[in-house]
């Protein structure tokens, strides 16, 4: 999510509605084809967002934490996530984290998750929003991914997403970049690779029909602030259209809405655009037996002077390794669980 998008998501929620043109891969090397609802997840992000030219320090962690401390903190948070049905966490990586001293400690968050049987999606975030949705240093990017796939290529609980929201590339450019990545990083088996849709990962149709990605999973993003306001039915049609014919191997790796403002996501008759959107996304997920990783569990871009992203599902309390998460919106939690098929 970019700075511009964070501003747009507040402004566009009130825009007048417009007319819109209208699966499981088991961990390991099973074919990507039937459904993806084994991914019941959330994003754990940096407070301030993951676009950074420095090391990625997730919300709740400190760069002074040892590997053991990171693992202990992560396990405390994963316990609370698991209590609502989470079994997957999507974590960011970048070229300023992997291969550094901090990386050896950051890996505690990955290893704590896989040790308990969680799936982990490792996704590359570009070097700051100012880089325009493009990889700024291809050599460093490939070096980063070589390290990551060497370490985790044989771990069937770890999945690889070459790039988050590759919006700086045309469709043809991005598909070439992604295909080259797959050829180069052969340790990342296709069935555990998620190729992002075009734009802000918001359209899967070109990826879906490109035979170079037949064996992969697909990463899909959908937010209300991407678009003008819609009815519930318009949102459902729009989401299904953007999935193309590949819903069976798509994971909604980002979707979210305010969780701290008291919205009622159980209200089927709501006229609130965010409520209609979340209800539509989760219905499409459930209808297609699709998995999803909500944005975010914690972290993200603070809203106003609040000190937290108002999309975040949890509030964080505690100190040291004694960390606790509390759900901000029970109806939002329940609707996300509904989308997961629970």
Image (cartoon, rainbow, N blue to C red):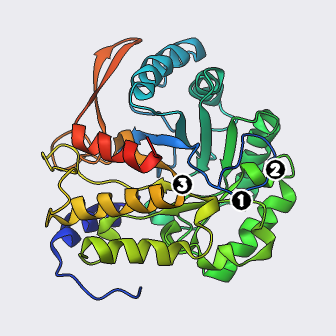
Residue drawn at 32 percent across, 13 percent down: 319
Quarter of the image that includes the C terminus: top left
Q: Position of residue 179 (x, y in %)?
A: 78, 68
CA distance for labels 1 and 3: 11 Å
Which of the 4 quarters of the picture holds residue 23? bottom right
- Number of numbered discs visible in the structure rendering: 3
Residue drawn at 78 percent across, 61 percent down: 215
Residue drawn at 64 percent across, 47 percent down: 95
Q: Secondary structure at mark 2?
A: loop
Q: Secondary structure at mark 3?
A: loop
Give the side of residue 66 with respect to residue 60, left or right: right
Task: Name the residue that disc number 3 marks.
Answer: 289
Q: Nearer the viewer, residue 137 or 27?
A: 27
Local packing at callout 1 (Cα closer than 10 Å; few below 14, some 14-19, many 20+) is: many
User: Residue 263 bears which disc, if any?
Assistant: none
The reply to whether callout 1 and callout 3 are in contact (CB within 8 Å) is no
Above or below, comparing residue 57 to residue 175 in the picture: above
Q: Nearer the viewer, residue 270 or 196?
A: 270
Quarter of the image that includes the N terminus: bottom left
The reply to whether residue 17 is visible in this rendering is yes
Could you tell which of marks 1 and 2 lies nearer the N-terminus?
A: 1
The reply to whether residue 329 is visible in this rendering is no
Local packing at callout 3 (Cα closer than 10 Å; few below 14, some 14-19, many 20+) is: many
Q: Position of residue 90 (x, y in %)?
A: 53, 42
Above or below, comparing residue 182 to residue 16 in the picture: above
Task: Name the residue that disc number 2 marks.
Answer: 189
User: Residue 33 bears which disc, if any?
Assistant: 1
Q: Secondary structure at mark 1?
A: loop
Could you tell which of marks 2 and 3 lies nearer the N-terminus?
A: 2
């Amino acid at each position: 999510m970019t700075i511009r998008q964070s501003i747009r998501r507040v402004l566009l929620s009130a825009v007048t509605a417009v007319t819109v043109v209208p699966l499981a891969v088991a961990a390991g090397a099973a074919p990507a084809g039937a459904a993806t609802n084994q991914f019941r997840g959330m994003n754990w992000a940096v407070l301030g967002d993951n676009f950074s030219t420095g090391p990625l320090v997730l919300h709740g962690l400190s760069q002074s934490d040892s590997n053991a401390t990171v693992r202990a903190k992560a396990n405390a948070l994963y316990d609370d996530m698991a209590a609502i049905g989470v079994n997957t966490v999507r974590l960011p990586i970048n070229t300023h984290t992997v291969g550094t001293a901090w990386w050896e400690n950051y890996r505690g968050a990955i290893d704590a998750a896989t040790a308990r049987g969680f799936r982990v999606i490792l996704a590359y975030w570009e070097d700051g929003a100012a880089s325009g949705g493009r990889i700024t240093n291809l050599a460093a990017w490939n070096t980063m991914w070589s390290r990551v796939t060497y370490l985790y290529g044989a771990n069937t609980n770890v999945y690889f997403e070459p790039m988050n929201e590759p919006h700086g590339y045309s469709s043809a450019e991005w598909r070439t970049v992604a295909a080259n990545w797959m050829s180069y990083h052969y340790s990342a088996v296709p069935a555990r690779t998620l190729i992002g849709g075009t734009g802000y990962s918001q359209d899967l149709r070109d990826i879906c029909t490109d035979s170079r990605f037949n064996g992969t999973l697909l990463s899909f993003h959908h937010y209300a602030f991407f678009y003008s306001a819609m009815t519930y039915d318009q949102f459902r049609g729009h989401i299904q259209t953007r999935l193309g014919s590949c819903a069976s191997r798509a994971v909604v790796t980002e979707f979210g809405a305010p969780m701290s403002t008291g919205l009622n996501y159980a209200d089927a008759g709501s006229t609130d655009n965010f409520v209609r959107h979340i209800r539509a996304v989760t219905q499409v997920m459930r209808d297609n037996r699709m998995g999803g990783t909500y944005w975010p569990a914690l972290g993200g871009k603070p809203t106003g002077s609040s000190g937290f992203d108002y999309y975040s599902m949890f509030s964080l309390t505690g100190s040291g390794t004694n960390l606790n998460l509390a759900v901000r919106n029970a109806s939002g939690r329940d609707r996300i669980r509904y989308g997961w098929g629970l």
